[in-house]
Image (cartoon, rainbow, N blue to C red):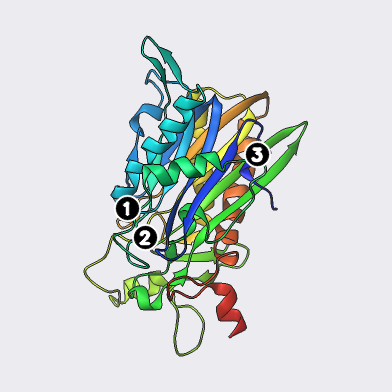
């Protein structure tokens, strides 16, 4: 399973990448509006306009999603997305002009690269200007630039994370896709066999230690840093109500649980957005199963497509050494 989130009609993706500072941001634009949903499973999330996405709240369309590095500082970048959308006339009509709705989520990537450099509103504006309907970049790009995994023993044992995408064709023109930024405290697993494909590195064997085993043995480093969080977007061209997008976000989270261990910990801020943009119809159970598959594949691709950055080695480089 491969593919881009932009295989869902009506979406564009753009990135701002700073490899030197090891940070960046990713925008998903839906200028015509998309029905949103969200599921927050980690205990340390950082976000903006999150509550507005839940069922029962008045706003039923969003016009973009921002995923950013920079920890809480990165939330300021959403202003650049709003500026771009205002310029193209995308947003809710009001007596004062359009007001775009741009939910946002961030990762903590300040532990590598240059901690004082964070994505800005201008950087996010650049990402919007560069956004296309054919963007398919993965790995250390955009919000995945400074992502890392397996940090329970400290950054010196960590492995490079990144951004991954995958899509699934359900037939009859129905598509569901996922874009995931993997910056987990724990390990990334191959769900087909349960083996770790990225995590805290075992410097003696060249393989990976298991975070859950280290946790049980009280061998993890204290105090814990908050340098974690998996964030992403699941999108579909199936017409969904807001309560259904909320449910799809909860279902899609299973993909994170299958591939990241431990998942949704006290040290992660895992957040999944959902966008419904289209008029297709599909059974919710079938859609949920395929969404889980897309998330599962996107998580694995995030680490396999990553390259070594700021001294943190990537899986591909460990295999070659």
Callout 3: helix, strand or loop? loop
When asked about the image quadrant of residue 153, the answer is bottom left
Question: Dot 1: few (<14), some (14–19), or many (≥20) neighbours within 10 Å?
Answer: many
If the image is split into quadrants, where does the C terminus sit?
Answer: bottom right
Residue 248 visible from this viewpoint: no
Q: Earlier in the sequence, mark 3 or mark 1?
A: 1
Residue that numbered label 1 is attached to: 71
Spot occupied by residue 160 in the image (x, y as percentages of width and height): 48, 68
Q: Earlier in the sequence, mark 2 or mark 3?
A: 2
Residue drawn 46% across the image and 72% down it: 159
Q: Where 58 sits versus 231, above or below?
A: above
Q: Are marks 3 and 1 in contact (CB under 8 Å)?
A: no
Residue drawn 39% across the image and 54% down it: 229
Residue 215 visible from this viewpoint: yes
Residue that numbered label 2 is attached to: 109
Residue drawn 56% across the image and 67% down it: 194
Please state if 21 lies on the left or on the right of 140 as rendered: left
Q: Are marks 1 and 2 in contact (CB under 8 Å)?
A: yes
59 or 257, which is in the foreground? 59
Residue that numbered label 3 is attached to: 133
When asked about the image quadrant of residue 118, the answer is bottom left
């Amino acid at each position: 399973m491969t593919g881009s989130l932009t295989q869902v009609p009506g979406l564009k993706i753009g990135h701002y990448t700073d490899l030197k500072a090891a940070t960046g941001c990713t925008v998903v634009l839906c200028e015509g509006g998309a029905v949103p949903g969200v599921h927050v499973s980690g205990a340390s999330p950082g976000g903006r306009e999150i509550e507005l996405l839940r069922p029962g709240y008045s706003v039923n369309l969003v016009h973009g999603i921002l995923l950013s590095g920079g920890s809480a500082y990165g939330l300021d970048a959403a202003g650049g997305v709003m500026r771009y959308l205002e310029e193209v006339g995308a947003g809710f009509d009001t007596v004062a002009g359009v007001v775009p709705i741009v939910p946002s989520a961030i990762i903590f990537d300040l532990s590598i690269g240059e901690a004082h450099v964070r994505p800005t509103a201008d950087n996010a504006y650049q990402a919007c200007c560069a956004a296309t309907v054919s963007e398919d970049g993965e790995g250390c790009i955009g919000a995945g630039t400074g992502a890392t995994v397996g940090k329970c023993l400290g950054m010196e044992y960590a492995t490079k994370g990144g951004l991954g995408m995958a899509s699934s064709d359900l037939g009859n023109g129905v598509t569901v896709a996922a874009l995931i930024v993997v910056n987990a405290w724990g390990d990334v697993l191959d769900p087909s066999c349960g083996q770790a494909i990225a995590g805290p590195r075992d410097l003696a064997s060249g393989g990976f230690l298991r975070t859950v085993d280290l946790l049980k043995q009280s061998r993890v480093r204290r105090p814990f840093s908050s340098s974690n969080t998996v964030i992403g977007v699941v999108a579909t061209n199936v017409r969904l109500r807001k309560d259904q997008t909320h449910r799809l976000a909860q279902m899609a989270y299973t993909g994170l649980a299958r591939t990241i261990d431990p998942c949704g910990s006290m040290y992660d801020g895992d957040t999944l957005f959902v966008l419904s943009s289209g008029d297709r119809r599909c059974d919710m159970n079938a859609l949920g199963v395929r969404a889980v598959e897309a998330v599962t594949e996107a998580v694995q691709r995030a680490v396999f497509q990553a390259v070594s950055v700021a001294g943190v080695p990537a899986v591909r480089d460990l295999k070659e050494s």
